[in-house]
Image (tube, helix red, strand yellow):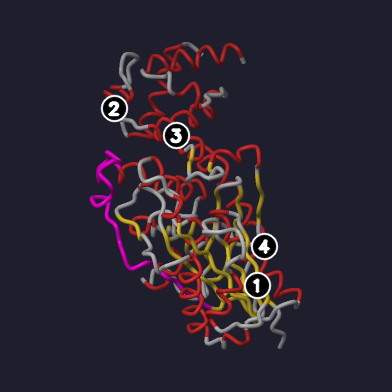
Amino acid sequence: MTADHPRVLALGEYRPSRSVPNSELPEALDTDDNWIRERTGIAARRIAGEDETVVSMAAAAAAKALATAGVDPADVDLVILASCSMPTPVPGGAARVGHLIGATTAGAFDINAACAGFCYGLSLAADAVRAGSARRVVVVGAEKLSDWTDWTDRRTAILFADGAGAAVVGGAAKPGIGPVVWGSDGRMAELIEIPVGGQLQMDGQAVFRWATTALAAVARKACASAGIPPEALAAVVPHQANLRIITSLARQIGAPDAVVADDIVESGNTSSASIPLALSRLVADGRVRSGEPALLLGFGAGLTWAGKVIEVP
Amino acid sequence: MTDNDILAAFADIVYDVARIDTSLVTPEKRFVDDFDIDSLSMVEIATAAEDKFGVSIPDSALSDLKTVGDAVAFISKAGVAA
């Protein structure tokens, strides 16, 4: 029996201990619970404390994923950290994550594809396993966006949050990660950006228009590439950007029987962490079962996007 | 397509997006003050109208469309230009 088909073996998550409901946001934002819920679907978000860093949260999520998978950290060949909110550009965080989880000699690198980062990392992991350059890969999406948030700007401060989600990818007899459909459009780079010396800013209306008009086709193409028609999906797990984007995408994709991830309601928008966090919650809540097909669709700053269908671990 | 035809088709879009009864969608009605339609719903209405009428309604134009009549006039003009 060969074991060179990549699969997600297990997921892990880390949610910061502090949950901030809409009512506890700074008064300077001049907003309220109804306003935020109507426009975003968000009721609360997790905000990391000083001791909860991108690296520490990533390591906590990765350690849980390894424990659930029953994989010895020493057997991890590669650690990929997807993040767009590292506090400094050098060094990257992946090597420190590897050190913290006991994958002390694994290859390690960071990627930044913003909110699509986890899906990009998952593809790289699958390709590494398929090619034989790694047998066990840890992929983590981890963000501490609260460090980069303008807490006086209600267009963004109500949205962004912190957390980490991880997956262990390894070889199996049966394939479990479908082909990736990815792309980018650098013409719209300024729609979501952190300018030099600045804080996160976003043209929400333009992003909303893009997300609700351009991405359903990406999702359907990912389904076609995997040989899974949308109506056969058990779960649709878009990046948790805004519940109204999620709802619109789900309707356009046409997966009437699928559960649609809505982790954003309690977790806010955690960029690269949102997809593994949302899928992990669906699994924990028993809303999807092991072996069922789930569509993952990452999209965000760049602009970048990546969709794929995986089997739920 | 007459302005009345555009209005009727546009009212269907407003119903689909915001669940406003089509009989209430008349030219003098204001999207924000009368229908409580927010900026994201306006984007949804605009993209649906783009599909239905084959016109382009960029975000820069959207903020000037305060009433149903503004939108019908914009679509009518854009359609003629196209």
Q: In which quarter of the image is residue A227?
A: bottom right
The structure residue drawn at horizontal position 66% and vertical position 55%, both measured from the top left corner, is A181
> Which chain contains the residue that carries disc 4?
A
Per the image, the residue denoted by label 2 is: B35
The residue type indicated by label 1 comes to Ala
**Label 1: few (<14), some or many (≥20) within 10 Å?**
many
Per the image, the residue denoted by label 3 is: B44
The structure residue drawn at horizontal position 65% and vertical position 65%, both measured from the top left corner, is A123
The residue type indicated by label 2 comes to Phe
In percent of width and height, residue A260 lies at 43, 58
The residue type indicated by label 4 comes to Pro
Distance of label 4 from label 3 (alpha carbons): 31 Å
Distance of label 1 from label 3 (alpha carbons): 42 Å
> Which chain contains the residue that carries disc 2?
B
Distance of label 4 from label 2 (alpha carbons): 44 Å
Q: Which element type, helix, strand or loop, lies under badge 3?
A: helix
Magenta stretch, residue numbers = A10-35
Per the image, the residue denoted by label 1 is: A108
Q: What number is the disc on residue A179?
A: 4
**Label 3: few (<14), some or many (≥20) within 10 Å?**
many
Q: Are the two marked residues, 2 and 3, in contact with CB atoms closer than 8 angstroms?
A: no
Please tell me whether residue A15 belongs to the stretch shown in magenta: yes
Q: Do tags 1 and 3 sit on the same chain? A: no
Q: Are the two marked residues, 1 and 2, in contact with CB atoms closer than 8 angstroms?
A: no
